C-alpha cells in the first residue's frame, strides 16, 4: 500500500501559487508534484488538489498526457481503475520545477508586494 498524498500538500501559501514561471497550465506543476513518488489514481490526486474541479483536473491530466509528461494506464480488473504516472520526460520536469519553486520562495515578499501594489493601482484606476 502506498503512502496517501497529504491533503495540505498545496496550502494557500504554497510558493507555487506565486511562481511566474509556468509549466503547462495552472495546475500542471501541482499534478506533476503529486506524481513525483509514483502512480496515483484520480481520487488520490483530488485530495491535495481539492481546489481544482474534477473537470479541470481531467483537462490538466489530458494535456500532460498529450505532451508526453504523464502516462495513463487503464487496469481492466474485477474493479477497473485508471492510474496516472510520470513518464521519463515528465520526471525531467522535476528538477527545473524545484529550481523555479525555490526562486519563488526566495522572492516571496517581493512577489507579494508587487502583486499588492499592482492590484491597489488597478483598483484606483477603476474607481477613478
Image (cartoon, grey):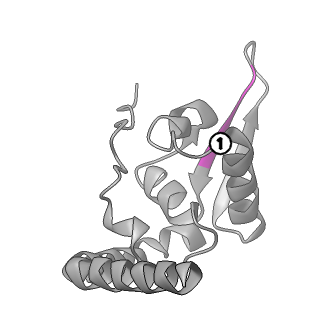
Q: Residue furthest top?
A: 78
Magenta span contains residue 99: no
Element under disc 1: loop
Q: Which residues are magenta?
A: 80-84
Q: Name which residue lies at 53% across and 40% down.
A: 45
Total of numbered circles in the picture? 1
| Foreground of the two, 34 or 105 | 105
> Measured along the vertical axis of the image, is residue 118 above or below residue 62?
below
> Measured along the vertical axis of the image, is residue 100 above or below residue 7?
below
- Residue 99 seen in this snapshot: no
Q: Name which residue lies at 49% across and 68% down.
A: 91
The N terminus: image quadrant: top left
Horizontal and vertical percent for residue 21?
A: 48, 83
- Check disc 1: other Cα within 10 Å, few if <14, some if 14-19, many if 20+: few
Find residue 4 and report its image quarter: top left
Find residue 13 and report its image quarter: bottom left
Amino acid at each position: 500500500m502506498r503512502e496517501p498524498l497529504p491533503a495540505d500538500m498545496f496550502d494557500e501559501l504554497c510558493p507555487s501559487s506565486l511562481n511566474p514561471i509556468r509549466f503547462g497550465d495552472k495546475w500542471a506543476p501541482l499534478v506533476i508534484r503529486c506524481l513525483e513518488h509514483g502512480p496515483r489514481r484520480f481520487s488520490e490526486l483530488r485530495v491535495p488538489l481539492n481546489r481544482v474541479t474534477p473537470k479541470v483536473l481531467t483537462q490538466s491530466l489530458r494535456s500532460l498526457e498529450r505532451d508526453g509528461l504523464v502516462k495513463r494506464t487503464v487496469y481492466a480488473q474485477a474493479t477497473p481503475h485508471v492510474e496516472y504516472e510520470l513518464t521519463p520526460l515528465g520526471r525531467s520536469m522535476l528538477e527545473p520545477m524545484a529550481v523555479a519553486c525555490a526562486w519563488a520562495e526566495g522572492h516571496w515578499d517581493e512577489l507579494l508586494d508587487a502583486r499588492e501594489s499592482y492590484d491597489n493601482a488597478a483598483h484606483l484606476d477603476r474607481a477613478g
